Image: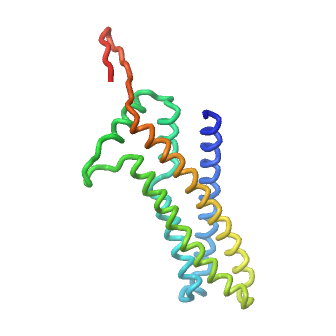
Amino acid sequence: MGTEFKTVEGRITSMLSQLHCECGILERLVYKNKNQHRRSSYFQHLLKVRRDLRLLHLPNIEELVTSCFNVIKGDRPKQKVHLLESLKRRKCNDVKRTFLERLLGSARLLAEMVEPILKAATEISILFARSFFMGLSVTIMALLARLLVLVQQILLDVVYLFNTVSSLSKNKQSIKITHEGIEVSL
């Protein structure tokens, strides 16, 4: 089970860096072609994909994944106790969200990103079939295909992490802490 988590961790970190690189390419393509294609429907769908990718960077998924793996591995027991207890408590809407709720939000966003990517690919394929802007069409189709694969694979791994951490948080944890001769069981 430990090797499985290491492979998932390595896979997620590499895919997130690749996704960041692909986002940079999309940003550059949008910047370069905004004046010429701004009103067309395929470009509007491409802007929706860019918006979703920008939203995906807000919850800082790398930090969330690291927190999940710290909980699963138990590398830092004090942090694990704190994280598991924070998962059991429900907080008000005003208070900062727990990392598990943020991970769930990221998973929902990843699930919702598939549809705009497919719509943009459909619109670009129409442009491609008419043989207009062939260089742009081929580049964007390849980019959208790569984004779709990365988003779906990251979604699969994030759901796996979420299920693992939530099952750990529901289990009753017992920990003994000894400090200056006083033993406390939690």
Give the image location of residue 54, x and y in percent: 50, 65
Quarter occupied by the N terminus: top right
Residue drawn at 36 percent across, 41 percent down: 87
Give the image location of residue 36, x and y in percent: 60, 87
- Closer to us: 147 or 2: 2
Compared to 34, does 160 lie above or below? above
Residue drawn at 53 percent across, 76 percent down: 47
Quarter occupied by the C terminus: top left
Seen as rendered, the residue at the extreme top is 181
- Closer to us: 65 or 21: 65
Residue drawn at 55 percent across, 56 percent down: 155
Give the image location of residue 99, x and y in percent: 41, 46
Q: Does 185 sit left or right of 23 as displayed?
A: left
Residue drawn at 36 percent across, 18 percent down: 177
Q: Does 69 sit left or right of 21 as displayed?
A: left
Image quadrant in which you'd find residue 93: bottom left
Colour scheme of the picture = rainbow
- Closer to us: 117 or 48: 117
Q: Does 164 sit left or right of 132 as displayed?
A: left
